[in-house]
Image (spheres, rainbow, N blue to C red):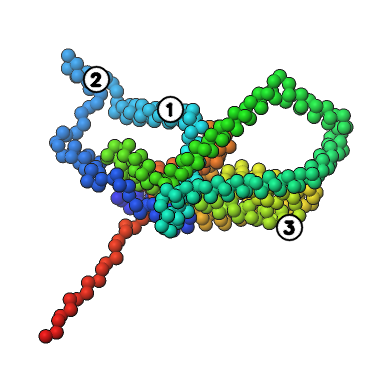
Amino acid sequence: MSKGRDDDVPDVGNDDPSPVADNQALEETSDTIDPEHSVDARSSEGTATDTGEGTAPEQHLVASSRGRVNTGVTPGMEIASAWAWRFLVLVAAVLVIGYGMRYLSEVVVPVTVGVLLTALLVPVTDGLQRLRIPRGPAAGITVFTTVVLVAGLLTLVGTQIASQFESLSAQVGEGVQELRDLARINFGLDDQDITDAFNSLREAVTSGGALGQRAAEVGTTATHVVAGLFIALFCLFFFLYQGAQIWAWLVRLFPRQAREKADSSGRKAWVSLTAFVRATIIVAAVDAIGISLGAAILGLPLVSAIGILVFVGAFIPVVGALISGVVAVLVALVAKGPIIAIIMLGVVIGVQQLEAHVLQPFLLGRAVSVHPLAIILAIATGVIVAGIVGALIAVPTAAVVNTIVNHLAGNDVDPEPPSRQLPRRRHRAPEVADG
């Protein structure tokens, strides 16, 4: 390769491994990969060249009963048309896959959530297995503990809301009255105008069967959520229990010549996914602890509920942090007034700036780096396809796709893992018997 082309290639492969990525996955190889059957495309091209077929014939000459006829198609047009129809085939394939995923979103989304939870919880199962617990029971213990932990957090939030419901309702009433006073002073609206506006809104919601339709939609959504939750838990158990066997089966679906690349691409993607999920967990925990601590110091109610909301919102890039921060500020405004709300806003902004400029660059780095424009487009696409759950899985999906494309193109961000070398045994010199 010439020096000029070397200068154009970006400097990649010099980053330190991510501190939260499961880099061990790269050091392994699926059992389905048979190195003896791997085909080098370049060698096949060289064989075709060495057969002495000569240069390519003029493609715009076609044979007929009267000899060769010049169709007038230039080589440039043939190249353009070849690229065009291949591009159309790829676009059609992407559209078909996208339509299928959207049509089966009630299955695709839970399976994706199960994969994300597996990337987070597989170290727990591995640790239990190292304690001489069989893989199956270890996976079951991991899933059961996760369910109990989530149920405990939800119970804590419900208990706190129930205990402070009366005082919070009174504070909300006072806040609504303050808003009415502000509307009357600044916009010249009297109480009758505000009451009429509320009545019009209520009639718009309840009229024309809209209330029954909304109730039916809520019931259907709740049913889908429950079914998706069970699917995700089943997927989580079997991914933890037989993840290696499932991946080996998936690799065997590829043609024999493509299995090696498919296996390495999947393992690269797994490293990127584990880095993203674990880093997001750490970032979400820091956000929740920081904002909850600030709310507790300011004496706000529902501190635990605010912390859990911030923790969950951190999994939705850009939008989640904004919504959770706004909720914390609104609680401060209703409970303590505008001064405390401004202070709470400063706490939220400070914690989120710490997350964006210190934690994420350190934990993720370039291993799962995705352009901000790609993040926004991925989130928008996820919302359109699967709503709030689509927004949750959009960014890790984009990170995985980015890693696979870079790996197949030969532009890996992280260097290839070093091959495992067995320690050399020191051979002792044979002892010579005396006499």
- Residue 182 in sight in this render: no
Quarter-of-image position of residue 97: top left
Residue 355 percent across, percent down from the top left: 59, 54
Which kind of residue does numbered mark 1 sit on?
Val
Residue 297 is labelled as: 3
In this rendering, position of residue 141 left or right of residue 69: right
Q: The residue under label 2 is which amino acid type?
A: Asn
Tag 1 near tag 3, CB within 8 Å: no
What's the mark number on residue 96? 1
Relative to 409, does residue 366 appear above or below in the rendering?
below
Sooner in the amino-acid sequence: mark 1 or mark 3:
1
- 78 up-or-down from 113: above or below: above
Quarter of the rendering containing residue 259 = top left
Disc number placed over residue 219 in the picture, else none? none
Callout 1: few (<14), some (14-19), or many (20+) C-alpha neighbours within 10 Å?
few
Name the residue rendered at 55%, 41% in the picture. Answer: 392
Residues at marks 2 and 3, CA–CA distance in whole angstroms: 85 Å
Give the number of the disc on residue 70. 2
Q: Nearer the viewer, residue 425 or 177?
A: 425
Crowding at dot 2, Cα within 10 Å, few <14 / some 14-19 / many 20+, comes out as: few
Task: Tell me which label, 1 or 2, sits earlier in the chain.
Answer: 2
Residue visible at 16% across and 39% down?
50
